[in-house]
Amino acid sequence: MIKLRIENLRKSFDGNKVLDGINLGLEAGKVMAVLGPSGSGKTTLLRCLNFLERADDGKLLIDDVAVDCKAVSKKQILALRRKIGFVFQNYNLFRHMTAEKNVMEGLVTPRGVPAKEAREMARAVLDSVGLADKYYSYPTQLSGGEQQRVAIARAMVINPEILLLDEPTSALDPELVGEAMQIIKKIARSGITMIIVTHEMSFAYEAADYAVFMDKGTIVETGNPTELFDNPQEERTRQFLKRLHRDNRDNRDNRDNREKE
Amino acid sequence: MEVINRFFSVEFMLKEIPFIASYLPTTIFMAVCATLIGWFIGFFVAMFRINRVPVLNQLAGFYISFIRGTPLMVQIYLTYYGIPIIITMFHALNGQPSAPITPFLPIAFAIIAFSINTGAYSAETIRAIVISIDKGQREAAFSLGLTASQTMRRIVLPQAFRVALPMLCNSFISNVLGTSLAFIVSVVDIMGAAKLVGGRSYRYFEVFVIVAILYWLISSVIQRFTYWLENKLRIPGTS
């Protein structure tokens, strides 16, 4: 069953075509990894899906409910956002709230869950990402890895049908990436529909059902990760992957070296 | 001692402090009202500016520019003489040119003038603060399903308030000091009382020393309170 379909999505900033006719479909419970060089429009694509950015043209179908991006109403946007969790690249935790309150906010204010119940739910999710001792910590008192896990908990506690992650590990120290990816993998296997922008190829290999390569606002190539990575059909994909392989290897080497030291 | 007393009488000062200080509530009342009403006005004006509400945005721009470009004393006179004219005109337009003007207390004119003044200055402050709140904070709220007004109430304003607090207190202090102009529309506050005592005794210098000390005391207390509150509201882990 198709959970999410994107049809002819277009977006320009000042005449600069950032998304130039994107078409994608994703079945319920599947995980899609989006790769591409910076400036390829990956982040804008994710942001258009929950209307943090308004696409200039195109259609979204979620559970066969069609939304015209040009003529979407505020009400429709709110309804869509309720189904979609979003993890930001730099987490964007609410600075004036403790970890627990950060996670509770999406339950209490938009959904009217009573505070007591929301607190229990928030704590359960924080426990599940290993932050049982950080309920009362403010974002500034948490490490990057911990902040990221709060961000994941905050997106997950509302029980979204679709989870969008925008380079969730790119702001982390290399030695924390593996740990973070474990958590995301666990979520990926839980039956949620997920789109993740990432350059962690190992994650895409192991946890993604589809890999999508984007460049200059278009989808260059898409397929299952093994096929796409091992046997890319397009020259642009090949070049990008070659570079990425090298970077990933370097990162891994750095990580290994650090562990040896 | 006797010679000194002729020029500067401590005894006289001590005797007159209670009388002048008994008008402190008027001063503080005016300053509190002006600050609260002023920031209330400022908040809406800032919102008109930030959201570029057509017409209101232009009016707000004119309001801010006019108030910041004219002396407070002139604004007080404009309020004092302008409001009765507007009321009379209003009556006249309703066909009752001789209807009596409901008497306004002088303090009401003063508070209106100070509020309008504070509104213009605080609008710019509030605008700058709200804009300075990281866009990502709002986006995170939107992504959780908060509406624009919920985001404002739950995320932006609580963060903005912490930043605004010192400026709110500065504004309160400057209003306390600014109310010393209220005597020109015959409000008797500590300044008004001082002038009365001065006129009675011709010991103007002593009287104004008292007034200076009183203003300074109030300002210091507000300053102290601000530090305390800032500390209390500080997000742990930030400086």
Image (cartoon, helix red, strand yellow):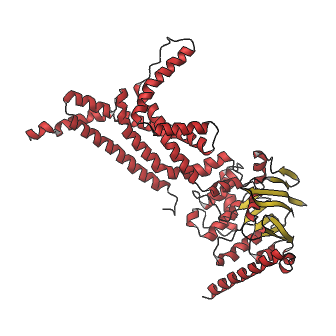
Q: Is residue B188 left or right of residue A165?
A: left
Q: Quadrant of residue A8?
A: bottom right
Q: Quadrant of the C terminus of chain A?
A: bottom right
Q: In this view, does A122 lie to the left or right of B73?
A: right
Residue at the image position 78 percent from the left and 55 percent from the top = A83
User: In the rendered image of this protein, does residue B174 appear above or below residue A211?
Assistant: above
Q: Quadrant of residue B74?
A: top left
User: In the rendered image of this protein, does residue A144 appear above or below residue B35?
Assistant: below
Can I make out residue A119 in this image? no
Relative to the observer, which residue lies in front, A129 or A240?
A240
The spot of residue A146 in percent (x, y) is 63, 69
Residue at the image position 56 percent from the left and 38 percent from the top = B60
Q: In this view, does B1 lie to the left or right of B92?
A: left
Query: Can you name the residue that lies furthest to the left here?
Result: B2
The spot of residue A39 in percent (x, y) is 72, 66
Relative to the observer, which residue lies in front, B129 or B196?
B129
Query: Can you name the residue that lies furthest to the bottom here?
Result: A260
User: In the rendered image of this protein, does residue A189 appear above or below residue B84?
Assistant: below
Residue at the image position 55 percent from the left and 66 percent from the top = A141
The spot of residue A67 in percent (x, y) is 83, 50
The spot of residue A231 in percent (x, y) is 87, 79
Can I make out residue B150 in this image? yes
Relative to the observer, which residue lies in front, B220 or B58?
B58
Q: In which quarter of the image is the N terminus of chain A?
A: bottom right
